[in-house]
Amino acid sequence: MVHQTISNNNNNASKASNKINPMKKLLGSLIVGSFLILSSGLLISCSSPPKAPPPVSTQPAPFTVPVRPDLAPSLQQAKSRWVLASWADLPGFNEDKLGEAWAAWLESCSRSNTSHQSLCPEVKRLANQSAENQREWLLRNLQPYRVESLGGGPGPANGLLTAYYEPVFEGSRVAKPGFEVALYGPPANLKSRSPWYSREEISKLPAAQNALKGKEIAFIADPVDALILQIQGSGRLWITHSDGRRQQIRLAFAGTNDHPYQSIGRWLLDQNLTKNATWPGIKTWLAQNPRRTQELLSKNPRFVFFKEEALHGIEAQLGPKGAQGVPLTPGRSIAVDPGSIPYGTPVWLSSSGPQTQLNRLVLAQDTGSAILGAVRADYFVGSGDLAGDLAGRLKQDLKLWVLLPR
């Protein structure tokens, strides 16, 4: 697709009384509760004599997982570095409703290109079990690594979290007064030149317009709404048929003209034409300057083409398919730079800002032209106006941990 939250609770993991603590296997005769310190890949043990054990508690001890001394202290990716971490580093891990993330994980497991295919049989087995069982399985079988930038200095630098959504607009199958802005499928000669015609050229050149004849999927009322659909990469339309029947269809991403994305809101700000670069602010400016509509839209040369998909049953509750080829799950799917995080990777996301606080398990299932860099994610929030309102405002700090098989 193409598209452009956090308590700091470092809690221990799930409770597991009456089970052998795995630290005993690693430390032998050392008492339970000693700490493993991994430094430069070496296991260092404390030389002072062990202290007397604390009084026996009537409360079950929390299940803990030490950092294994044989794990690599860091792993290099094309665009990021993954640094060994502990489960205690993940804010809010004990509070997340993991069942919601499991639905997204099952979607990734339906594809053979997931980076964690070996875990899928167990993921499927745990699908209907409690969050406590799922949490304990994660602790026993996966290892968190913090995602960092390759060019960063000492210590992790926060990344950037934005959000995207699936717009919903009224549409028409035919051009008519009030519905005159066409949404197109890919032209037959799209691959004949790269980049294809720019947005401005499409509005002016007969060659580009002739190539798009007969490729109209539907028509909507507002050219800015058409641009919103293209920036988000997909959307839904309500179509009213001649007999009054209402039908909702999905327009899914089908290609681009290969021009770079440019923000029209950024251009308005840079030109000091507005101080409100939200979509309502942009529409207000255009209402006051209607003759400059095409000028403004042309500042973003990127043009997106769609394909129509029907919505039936569960499909109406899920999002469009992301770059991994699976439907996106609202609140549990993220778009990433695949050079930093491969598709299908389970990721712990932690972000805090004025709009929302998020600490949750998500799946890397999509990408976007503006989603570039190591600690960078676009958070899929769903469809409709409420989702669009959040997506338009969310821009805040981000921390990411990938979860790898132990």
Image (cartoon, rainbow, N blue to C red):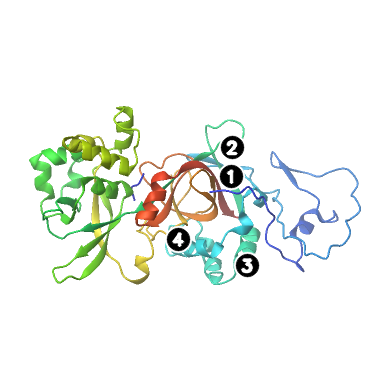
Query: From the viewer's perspective, is 97 left or right of 172?
Result: right
The residue beneath circle 2 is 156
Task: Say what secondary structure mark 3 lies in.
Answer: helix
Distance from disc 1 to disc 4, alpha carbons, whole Å, reads 22 Å
Residue 392's quadrant in the figure? top left
Q: Position of residue 295 (x, y in %)?
A: 19, 34
Query: From the viewer's perspective, is 167 left or right of 132?
Result: left
Q: Are marks 2 and 1 in contact (CB under 8 Å)?
A: yes
Task: Say what secondary structure mark 4 lies in.
Answer: helix
Q: Is residue 27 above or below residue 207?
A: below
Distance from disc 2 to disc 4, alpha carbons, whole Å, reads 28 Å
Near-viewer residue (231 or 117): 231
Tell me which residue sits at (72%, 60%) in the image.
Answer: 63
Q: Amino acid at mark 4?
A: Ser
Do we see residue 323 in this rendering?
A: no
Q: Position of residue 65 (x, y in %)?
A: 70, 56
Q: Position of residue 132 (x, y in %)?
A: 63, 66
The residue beneath circle 1 is 146
Badge 3 crowding class, 10 Å Cα cut-off, few under 14, some 14 to 19, many 20 or more, is some
Q: Are marks 2 and 3 in contact (CB under 8 Å)?
A: no
Q: Are marks 3 and 1 in contact (CB under 8 Å)?
A: no
Distance from disc 3 to disc 1, alpha carbons, whole Å, reads 24 Å
Q: Are marks 1 and 4 in contact (CB under 8 Å)?
A: no
Q: What number is the disc on residue 108?
A: 4
Near-viewer residue (302 or 180): 180
The residue beneath circle 3 is 133
Residue 284's quadrant in the figure? top left
Q: Is residue 61 above or below residue 34?
A: below
Q: Is residue 47 above or below residue 329?
A: above
Task: Say what secondary structure mark 1 lies in.
Answer: strand
Whichever of callouts 1 and 4 sits on the residue coming sooner in the sequence is: 4
